[in-house]
């Protein structure tokens, strides 16, 4: 990594810490971010008026607006607009850059694609001016998504490739395979199946290596669709089934609905109509749950076709007409073609010639509409590409003129600047040397404490496996060992990194709870809940803090409750941190302490030390809370810990 990038990342890290401290002070005045005060919008407007050119205050306000998007509701966009105007006047370019990109995202969600594109492009120009490589990758990707939403696939691909090249340059492993997945899906939409397979397979290899189940499931689904387009239904079925397994592991119900109707299409193409019907009925049930009429029309269309093949004409007509109504409502031309084809076959089979002729005409009309829409998009793509090239040419000319002017100024002030920089650098290096010594010492202690987690966890597990072996319960020992192998891999990987995504931590905890559930013969049930707008993929936290508390809840709370035990985990956004709550309905701390008077929890001791080290780095990190009835009259223990967002 270049010295420039190292300094850039160091700058962003320090600014991030300052933002966190400032935001916590702000939210103490306005209330918890989960339950903001009714006048939060007024407070932000008032703070914006007095912020002036104070970059720390402005950055703090941006984080407040962004983190409270859902609670602000209709005030979110006006507040973001006011923030953009203020930072533009204050010439606070980093804040303006981030806010423009965030507003572009919101306009894309609202399907205002022209406005979204203009906002992202302005953010892009600022990222280029500030040489912010990390932000450039986001903006290129966001511009690609805007074009993709409009089916301007050639332009989307161009921007995704720009994002990919930047991600590879800064060694953003996760970003690389995310973008490869999107590129593969976009090439599939463009019917360039060779390139689609190339990028999807590269993304799949990386997501498997990183044990990223969510992205792996996306890759399996996309690969299956490519093989379906190539009339290779048996290969497609393999990938659809593998993708479905991943979504089951993630407990992703909406994703399971999509997997089921894709599996149904594969079975239908293979002529296995019984299995196809079962898959479509499962998918239809889930799609009705989420009121996704586009997919409901697809499932009903195929179920109607299956009924027609089985000569159940009345049943087929009911399903196909319902499918047509839904497809017309959501303007799904592709689904209408499928449905009208089936209706044509139905009316012809039941000797209803006029209706058969009308269905045939409808097919031609919908096919022409699809063809015309594609031709129009091709023309629009060429127009936008021409405008983009013109703009890039103007930017290049302007940059050349500015370069000549800047060179004249730079030569005159170069020597004076170097002298000043030398003095400043000597001062900064001295202070950084002292600060880094403290941080390195804390970091080494942090790693030492974290490394102690693995032996402790492994020793507990191996004791359980030994118990099964000694009882000659080979089947349970094997199943338990397989679960442990997968879980241990996750734990080991997490112990080797400074931070992981909240999504990965939640998935590891689910695996651990399932693992303990199996070991204890379903002595307890569990639930893992998270705040609706918590972006678990983008939030990174220190790893392996939560598992010891879950272990204690099981070991000292619910392990002997014979199926009546309950463990609940809740994750929510709290100021600039993640609030984690671990609850059980066991006997409580008084009974547990009496029962385990001599028990010394090494893992809890390690966690407490690690939390102390974290609080040296994050001064506003609250203390851990353990709530339990001191008299032991009310069951259960409620643990609350706060982890910094890294």
Image: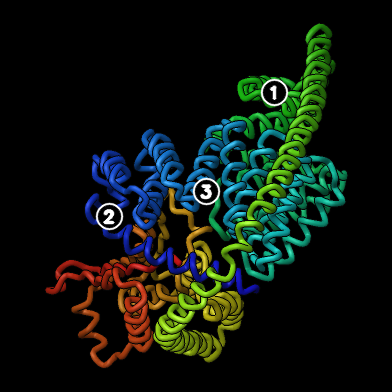
Quadrant where the image shows the C terminus: bottom left
SS label for mark 2: helix
The alpha-carbon separation of the residues under discs 2 and 1 comes to 57 Å
Furthest residue toward left: 631
**Residue 26, numbered circle:** 2
- What distance separates the C-alpha of mark 3 from that of mark 2? 22 Å
Q: Is residue 614 above or below residue 536?
A: below
359, above or below 423, in the image = above
Compared to residue 456, the image places residue 315 above or below, namely above
- Count the numbered circles shown: 3
Q: Which residue is mark 1?
A: 320
Using the rendered view, name the quadrant where residue 621 is placed. bottom left
Q: Which residue corresponds to the image point at 31% horizontal and 52% vertical from the top-left?
A: 33
Label 2 neighbourhood size at 10 Å, few (<14), some (14-19), many (20+)? some
Side (left or right) of 466 relative to 260: left
User: Element under label 3?
Assistant: helix
Along the line of sight, the residue nearer the viewer: 570 or 176: 176
Instruction: Evaluate if marks 3 and 2 touch, with contact meaning CB atoms under 8 Å apart.
Output: no
Q: Nearer the viewer, residue 353 or 252?
A: 252
The answer to the question of whether label 2 and label 1 lie on touching residues, with beta carbons closer than 8 A, is no
Q: Measured from the top left, where is residue 69 in percent x and y?
A: 40, 44
Instruction: Give the image location of residue 631, x and y in percent.
Output: 12, 74
Please say which color scheme the image uses.
rainbow
Label 3, label 1: how many angstroms apart (C-alpha)? 50 Å
Q: Which mark is residue 97?
A: 3
Q: Quadrant of the N terminus?
A: bottom right
């Amino acid at each position: 990594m270049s010295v420039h990038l190292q300094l850039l990342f160091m700058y962003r890290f320090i600014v991030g810490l300052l933002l966190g401290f400032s935001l916590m002070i702000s939210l103490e005045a306005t209330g918890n971010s989960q339950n903001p005060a009714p006048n939060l919008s007024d407070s932000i407007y008032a703070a914006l008026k007095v912020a002036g050119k104070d970059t720390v205050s402005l950055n703090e306000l941006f984080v407040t607006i962004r983190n409270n998007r859902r609670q602000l509701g209709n005030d979110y966009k006006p507040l973001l607009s006011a923030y953009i105007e203020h930072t533009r006047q204050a010439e606070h370019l980093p804040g303006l850059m981030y806010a423009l990109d965030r507003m572009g995202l919101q306009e894309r969600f609202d399907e205002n694609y022209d406005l979204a594109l203009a906002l992202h492009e302005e953010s892009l120009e600022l990222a280029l001016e500030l040489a912010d490589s990390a932000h450039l990758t986001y903006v290129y990707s966001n511009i690609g998504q805007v074009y993709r939403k409009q089916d301007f696939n050639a332009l989307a691909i161009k921007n995704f490739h720009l994002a990919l090249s930047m991600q590879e340059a800064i060694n953003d492993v996760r970003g690389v395979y995310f973008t490869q997945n999107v590129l593969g899906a976009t090439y599939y939409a463009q019917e360039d199946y060779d390139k689609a397979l190339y990028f999807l397979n590269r993304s799949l290899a990386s997501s498997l290596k990183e044990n990223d189940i969510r992205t792996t499931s996306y890759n399996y689904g996309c690969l299956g669709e490519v093989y379906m387009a190539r009339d290779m239904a048996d290969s497609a079925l393999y990938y659809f089934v593998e993708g479905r397994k991943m979504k089951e592991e993630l407990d992703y119900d909406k994703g399971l609905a999509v997997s089921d109707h894709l599996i149904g299409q594969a079975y239908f193409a293979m002529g296995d109509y019984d299995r196809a019907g079962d898959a479509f009925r499962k998918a239809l049930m889930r799609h009705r749950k989420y009121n996704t009429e586009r997919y409901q029309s697809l499932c009903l269309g195929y179920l109607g076709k299956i009924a027609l093949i089985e000569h159940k004409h009345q049943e087929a007509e009911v399903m196909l007409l319902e499918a047509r109504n839904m497809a017309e409502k959501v303007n799904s031309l592709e689904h209408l073609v499928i449905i009208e084809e089936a209706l044509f076959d139905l009316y012809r089979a039941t000797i209803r010639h006029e209706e058969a002729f009308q269905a045939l005409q409808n097919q031609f009309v919908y096919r022409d509409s699809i063809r015309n829409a594609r031709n129009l998009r091709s023309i629009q793509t060429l127009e936008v590409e021409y405008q983009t090239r013109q703009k890039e040419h103007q930017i290049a000319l302007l940059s050349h003129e500015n370069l000549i002017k800047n060179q004249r100024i730079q030569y005159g002030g170069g020597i004076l600047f170097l002298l000043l920089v030398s003095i400043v650098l000597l001062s900064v290096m001295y202070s950084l040397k002292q600060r880094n010594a403290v941080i390195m010492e804390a970091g080494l202690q942090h790693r030492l404490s974290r490394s102690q987690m693995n032996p402790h966890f492994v020793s507990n597990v191996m004791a359980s496996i030994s118990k099964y072996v000694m009882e000659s319960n080979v089947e349970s020992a094997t199943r338990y060992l397989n679960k442990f192998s997968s879980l241990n891999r996750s734990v080991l990987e997490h112990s080797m990194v400074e931070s992981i995504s909240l999504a990965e931590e939640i998935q590891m905890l689910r695996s651990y709870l399932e693992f303990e559930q199996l070991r204890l013969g379903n002595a307890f049930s569990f639930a893992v809940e998270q705040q609706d707008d918590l972006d678990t993929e983008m939030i990174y936290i220190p790893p392996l803090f939560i598992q010891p508390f879950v272990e204690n809840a099981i070991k000292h709370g619910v392990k002997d409750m014979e199926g009546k035990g309950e463990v609940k985990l809740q994750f929510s956004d709290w100021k600039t941190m993640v609030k984690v709550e671990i609850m059980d309905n066991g006997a409580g701390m008084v009974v547990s302490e009496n029962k385990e008077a001599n028990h010394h929890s090494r893992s809890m001791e390690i966690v407490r030390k690690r939390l102390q080290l974290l609080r040296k780095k994050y001064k506003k990190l609250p203390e851990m809370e353990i709530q339990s009835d001191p008299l032991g009259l009310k069951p259960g223990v409620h643990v609350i810990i706060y982890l910094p967002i890294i």
